[in-house]
Image (cartoon, rainbow, N blue to C red):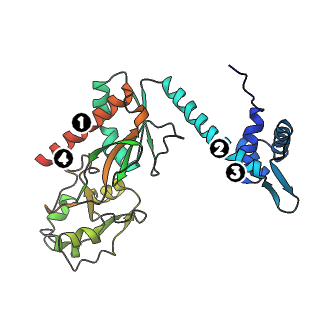
Amino acid sequence: MARRRLPPLNALRAFEAAARHLNFEKAGDEIAVTASAVGQQVKSLEAWLGRPLFVRQPSRGVALTPLGERYAASLADILDRLDEATAQALRSDRSNVVTVSSMPSFASGWLIPRLGSLKERHPDLEVRVSVDTRLTDFAREDVDVAVRFGRGGYAGLRTDLLMEEYFFAVCSASLLNDPERPLKEPADLRHHTLLHESVYSIPDYTTWDRWLAAIGVEGVDTSRGPSFPHTYLCLQAAASAQGVALATNVLIGDYLTAGRLVQPFPHQVKGTYQYYVVCPEATADRPAVAAFRAWLLEEAKAHVAEAGRQ
């Protein structure tokens, strides 16, 4: 096998960062060296190649030469693949560890309370829960499985429908027994405080407006009432008799079974988005990942069946 012709790797790293930023100071901040050190590394790479990669513009910074543009594009792809290969190598040393990412509300209201049953079934499996509202970038993040809230259709990922989501009204039992403001039908909500979840960044999310329109109720002022940044805070406010909240079959937790909340009406509205469990095809059949996915899907099926019996 012919010997590889590889330039200094530190110089490559400095050049690739400088090419992305077109600024030696910003490149230095990224790789934790000074702008002067970045400049020296770039010069050493240019000397090794025998050709310029940047055009120095004293009053306007630097610009890539045509060769620099082509070389930077190739290096970016190579370094991305190296990053992914390194992540895969690190995961292979932790064959019994599964890192799962989900939204905070799903993690606290559904996933974490059930991890005890996973430990009983797979005592050697170690689960690490990561919470985030962003979509997981499996190529760059140390995540094996993610629970996504959306419409499905995640290209390149093994995707299973976890649960469909349905919305219904909930409140403290004490509100039901108010003789002056009964809660017998949805139209009675006009006499009560509505509790809201702050979901303005999610288009078409089921808010009080959409829920009432879906069941054909008019005349309720949905602009009033406090808002909360997370589902569990909204449910806690409802359990404290501060008003009526919209809950879902997925995120209700044990509030209904424990009697802390009740459903004043039977009306339910299916949400626009559903819950999916996703992971890269390349690692979907790794024993630890496959075991976690199978357990998660079984737990969701049991949860849906139990909700149907209530």
Q: Work out how far the residue at label 3 is from the one at label 1, CA to CA, in angstroms.
A: 45 Å
**What is the three-letter code of the residue carrying label 3?**
Arg
Mark 3 vs 2: CB contact within 8 A = yes
Mark 1 surroundings: few (<14), some (14-19) or many (≥20) residues within 10 A: few
Which residue sits at x=18%, y=56%? 262
Pointer 3 or 4: first along the chain? 3
- Please, what secondary structure does the residue beneath circle 2 have? helix
Name above or below for residue 107 compared with residue 263: above
Q: Is residue 287 left or right of residue 92?
A: left
Residue for badge 2: 76
Which of labels 1 and 4 is toward the front? 1
- Please, what secondary structure does the residue beneath circle 4 have? loop
**What is the three-letter code of the residue carrying label 2?**
Ala
Q: Which mark is residue 298?
A: 1
Pointer 3 or 1: first along the chain? 3
- Please, what secondary structure does the residue beneath circle 1 have? helix
Q: Work out how far the residue at label 1 is from the one at label 2, CA to CA, in angstroms.
A: 41 Å
Q: Which mark is residue 20?
A: 3
Residue 24: x percent and y percent?
79, 50
Name above or below for residue 34 compared with residue 57: above
Mark 1 vs 4: CB contact within 8 A = no
Q: Decide if residue 283 is in sight here.
A: yes
Q: Residue furthest right?
A: 58
Pointer 1 or 4: first along the chain? 4
Mark 2 surroundings: few (<14), some (14-19) or many (≥20) residues within 10 A: some
**What is the three-letter code of the residue carrying label 4?**
Thr
Which of labels 3 and 1 is toward the front? 3
Q: Which mark is residue 202?
A: none
Residue for badge 4: 257
